[in-house]
Image (cartoon, grey):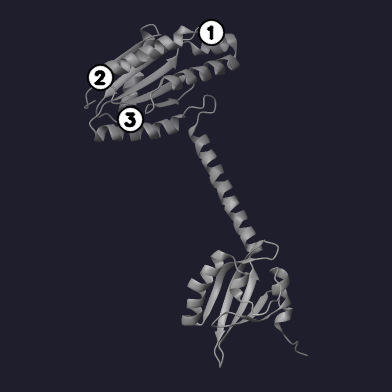
Amino acid sequence: MVPVFTPDVFPCGCLVTTLSEQVILRANPYFYLEFQQAPKAQQRLSDVLTPASKIVLESFVMPMLLNMGHCEEIQLTIQGNSGERLPVLVNANVQQGDEPLIFWVINSAKQRDKLYQELVDLRNALEEKAERLELLSQTDELTGLLNRRAFISRAQLLLKQAHRHDQTCSFLLLDIDHFKQINDLHGHACGDAVLRQLGQLLQKNCREHDVLARIGGEEFAIICMDSPTDSAAAFAEKLLRLVSAEPIDGIAVTVSIGVATAGQLSFEQLYKQADLLLYEAKHAGRNRLVAALYPADI
């Protein structure tokens, strides 16, 4: 035997309303129970909606029904008798006749909204995790400064900007003097402390637009835009004094610095010249700087 299907057995709200005033002529029990409503004489569909959904009904849903005869998956919000706002999805179809009627199917969207919010939260968590991973991929774990890869990327952008504006850039390459002896005599934990505190000192004294990084074991790099040779050398001289002024964990620490300045050199060329100047500073006795200005044709 084929079962008889009536609106009362469907797990959704089923309504019949007039077309002109949307007066509810019939609603199944599910509608009243699920959406916290009670039957009322001359009750209109808009009576059970929130103020915002009433506007959507009158300005969007009804014009669509009058012009097209149907609407699909319109999200509205029902105001329950308890005050709870209940999100719903509405489908409707106009039945023509002596008195045109609207047949409504109203489904609860609470579970859909919950799943959607879970997806939004998951997406936000994944984005935050991706941002953290990106930050970690650019950061030196010990000092918290940029690592070599991130430094090269940012320094190349800074050089391109300097080239476009016909500005000079200075590349400071710093190396801790006798760092192997610090590790051998005092242990690697002490050596790590020296690296961390030196990184903090450099970060504190760099300008806002300077790019600072730890690019190797005991090697740090700074690139400064629009720094003439004497200005970059003065900055390096200041760093020399600051580093040697106070012992770190009771250890006297000094650095050697190579300062290369140029107008149109590539990153690789400027890095190479700074490395050569650092070698000269080491060879000359350490705890000093060597600076030079290079032409564009190196």
Please report contact status of discs 3 and 2: CB closer than 8 Å, yes or no: no
Residue occupying image coordinates x 31% and y 15% = 233
Chain-order first, disc 3 or disc 1 = 1
Q: Residues within 10 Å of mark 3 (few under 14, many from 20)?
A: some
| Residue type, numbered disc 2 | Leu
The residue to which callout 2 is attached is 293
Q: CA distance from mark 3 to mark 2?
A: 15 Å
| Distance of label 2 from label 1 (alpha carbons) | 34 Å
Which of marks 1 and 2 precedes in the sequence? Answer: 1
Q: Position of residue 246 (x, y in %)?
A: 49, 8
The answer to whether residue 228 is left or right of residue 62 is left
The spot of residue 121 in percent (x, y) is 59, 51
SS at circle 2: strand
Label 3 sits on residue = 267
Query: Left or right: where does residue 255 sit relative to residue 9?
Result: left
Q: Which residue is tagged 1?
A: 251
- Left or right, 264 with respect to 189, comes to left
Question: Which amino acid is tagged 1?
Answer: Ile
Q: Taking 248 as reference, is 164 above or below it?
A: below
Q: Residue furthest front?
A: 41
Residue 67: x percent and y percent? 46, 81
Badge 1 crowding class, 10 Å Cα cut-off, few under 14, some 14 to 19, many 20 or more, is: some
Quarter that holds the N terminus: bottom right
Q: Position of residue 93 (x, y in %)?
A: 56, 81
